[in-house]
Amino acid sequence: MENAALIAEVMKFTVIAAGLLIGLGALGTAIGFAILGGKFLEGSARQPELTPMLQTKMFIVAGLLDAVPIIGVAIALLLIFANPFVSALQAVGG
């Protein structure tokens, strides 16, 4: 297989991988937010006097949950625009 065809094949799979990375990261975060919100409401309903403390902890965990898709998008952008696999193929192929 020619070097240009190999690079096109790598880019094709890279785009699929980036889409999966972003999509599954968003899905996992959505599920995490749903569980977090449900547990917060459940805890606030059971003990209303603890609501401010629970709310603070909920926002901290929500911030940590937001990091997952942001990191996924950063890795996907790295793979699409500065693909190390394509660079390695170009170095080998000349």
Image: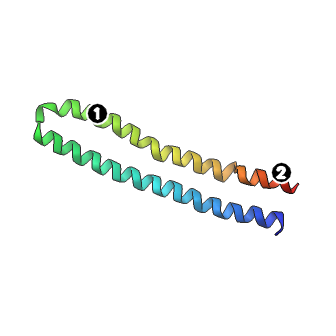
Of badges 2 and 1, nearer the viewer stands: 2
List the single residue furthest toward the bottom.
1
Query: Is disc 1 placed on a helix, strand or loop?
Result: helix
The residue lying at 76 percent from left, 61 percent from top is 7
Indicate the amino acid at tag 1.
Answer: Lys
Where is 54 relative to 77, above or below?
Answer: above
Q: In the drawing, what numbered circle is on residue 91?
A: 2
Q: Earlier in the sequence, mark 2 or mark 1?
A: 1
- Using the numbered discs, state the Cα–Cα distance from disc 2 to disc 1 in whole angstroms: 49 Å
Query: Is disc 2 placed on a helix, strand or loop?
Result: helix
Left or right, 14 with respect to 3, comes to left
Total marks shown come to: 2
Please name the colour scheme applied to the rendered image.
rainbow
The residue lying at 52 percent from left, 44 percent from top is 71
Indicate the amino acid at tag 2.
Answer: Ala
Q: In the drawing, what numbered circle is on residue 57?
A: 1
Left or right, 11 with respect to 19, comes to right
**Where, quadrant-wise, is the N terminus in this rendering?**
bottom right
The residue lying at 58 percent from left, 51 percent from top is 76
Where is 47 relative to 9, above or below?
Answer: above
**Where, quadrant-wise, is the C terminus in this rendering?**
bottom right
User: x%, y% of residue 72?
Assistant: 52, 48
Q: In the drawing, what numbered circle is on residue 38?
A: none
Left or right, 84 with respect to 43, comes to right
User: x%, y% of residue 58?
Assistant: 29, 37
Left or right, 11 with respect to 39, comes to right
User: x%, y% of residue 12?
Assistant: 66, 64
